[in-house]
Amino acid sequence: MDPHVFVLFGATGDLAALKLFPALYRVSQRDGAPPPAVIGVGRSDWDDTTLQDAAVDALTEADVDEGEAREWAESALRYARVEAYDQLGPVFETAEALEAERGLDGNRVYYLALPPSTFPGTITALGEYEEDRGTVGEHVPDDAPWVRLVIEKPFGHDLASAQELNRIVHEHFPENAVYRIDHFLGKETVQNLLVFRFANAFFESAWSRRDVERVEITVAETNDAAGRAGYFDGVGTMRDMIQNHLTQLFSLTAMEPPARLDAEGIRREKIKVLRSTRTARSNETVLGQYGPGAGHDEGYRDHEGVPEDSRTDTFAAVRLHLDNWRWQGVPFVLRTGKRMAERLTEIAVVFRRPPITLFQASGGCDPERNVLRLRLQPNEGFTLSFDVKTPGDGFGVSTRELSFRYEDTFGPFPDAYETLLRDVAEGDPTLFVHAEEAEEAWRIYHAVLDNTDIEVHPYESGGWGPDAAGRLVEAPPPEES
Ligand code: NDP
């Protein structure tokens, strides 16, 4: 990990307090990490002390000892105040002064934890400055400092805006300097998908249309959009969750083994999955919006700031089809919702039944259909359901589970942001979203975004979403492509 200055745009914001200060602290505690030099940037009337106090609060909230938090914040953090995020003179002056003071070589990370409306102006201002500094552009000397640009989600709000944002980024920065965040990729259990699939030949050999009937990917949240209407209304779960997080889980589940376990090898296979995925159709998309229920008197439209005729989806389910050799004819159902019965992220691989059913179920179970459930949160691990003979019951069959829980074997996981910030500092883009991936993911959903022909079904808070979503799992996949 080379010494560098980490410039955090949006240092006064929620993400900085919730995730980024704790992650920066933990990365800097690792063996061999250089002393941290962080510049927080904001328009707020803060100074070094205000920023350091905010970081100490954030760290103690994340269970860091207050004395250690204070020592770290005072040595690591400086504040640069800007009038606007495309007028960055104070940022560059602070960075240059810090580099001179500490004898640093000029390597920098720019992390945009800002509202997406500011991305184009900030990226352009950074790009012009870095071109002048000679770190990007046509003739970059071999010994020039490195620069890495980290962009928070959402990357665009549809295909055209993602393409335009990529154009602005690439006007100044080469793709290998760009780190688009999807924090799901930083989760240990998401990375374990690759190990699970490609280190266990037993599963991999059954991982195709021959043995798999369908795959269900679920991200259920118990939280709601109260207090976040300003951001969430008009965005909805299709954009906020399906296009990014669930589509990442989908491509990791469906991809071919990479030729090499590096960024290029893995991203190439993920992009191939997205390219071979048909555009989602309105008759295979179910949208929902929560009403009251489970102790909540208010539904979505009752939240402050939400129009009473809002069509924003707080639940979305979509059935995807791939045209490739491995998955032809196997539906992938992606679904996510707010105010659901429980918090759960899971990939369920539902295997085909044997060609002939010989046995009877006991106790109302569904015999002879194995289901592998990869639990990404909570209770990370997996279960595999399988059938056994019920003792003393002729050839009656009942379904039981083999299970593994991480918690029983390993200690706590690092937070996703800690993993991602460490990878940025080390220059490893494997767990970040490539430009083409971002665009392909928007392409898949372009026909169902803002499509007013799709009904938005009301559903009760505390349940599993609209009943209509069930048909996506039950109905046979349509014939036509
Ligand atoms: P905030 O709304 O807290 O904004 C971050 C900072 O940006 C603010 O402190 C403010 O700083 C500045 N800002 C806010 N509104 C504007 C505006 N209209 N124009 C210019 N500057 C503005 O955002 P978050 O910290 O919640 O999120 C930052 C990024 O991270 C976003 O892209 C978000 O989608 C993403 N993200 C956030 C998550 C979270 O849990 N919060 C989770 C995952 C991703 P100042 O006024 O000092 O300039």
Image: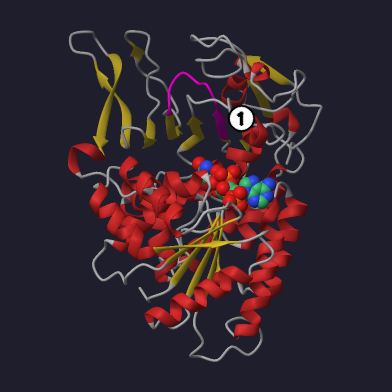
Q: Which residues are magenta?
A: 333-343
Circle 1 is placed at which residue position? 317
Q: Secondary structure at mark 1?
A: strand
| Residue 35, quarter of the rendered image | bottom left
Q: Nearer the viewer, residue 56 or 21?
A: 56
**What is the three-letter code of the residue carrying label 1?**
Ala
Q: Please identify the quadrant where the C terminus is shown.
A: top right
Q: Is residue 470 above or below residue 40?
A: above
Label 1, ligand 1: CB separation under 8 Å:
no
Name the residue at 40% across, 65% down. 261
Magenta run includes residue 339:
yes
Name the residue at 28% across, 58% down. 71
Name the residue at 49% across, 83% down. 145
Look at the image and name its color scheme: secondary structure
Q: Is residue 421 above or below residue 323?
A: below
- In the rendered view, does 475 fall on the left or right side of 142? right
Q: Is residue 75 above or below residue 103?
A: above
**Residue 361 in view here:** yes
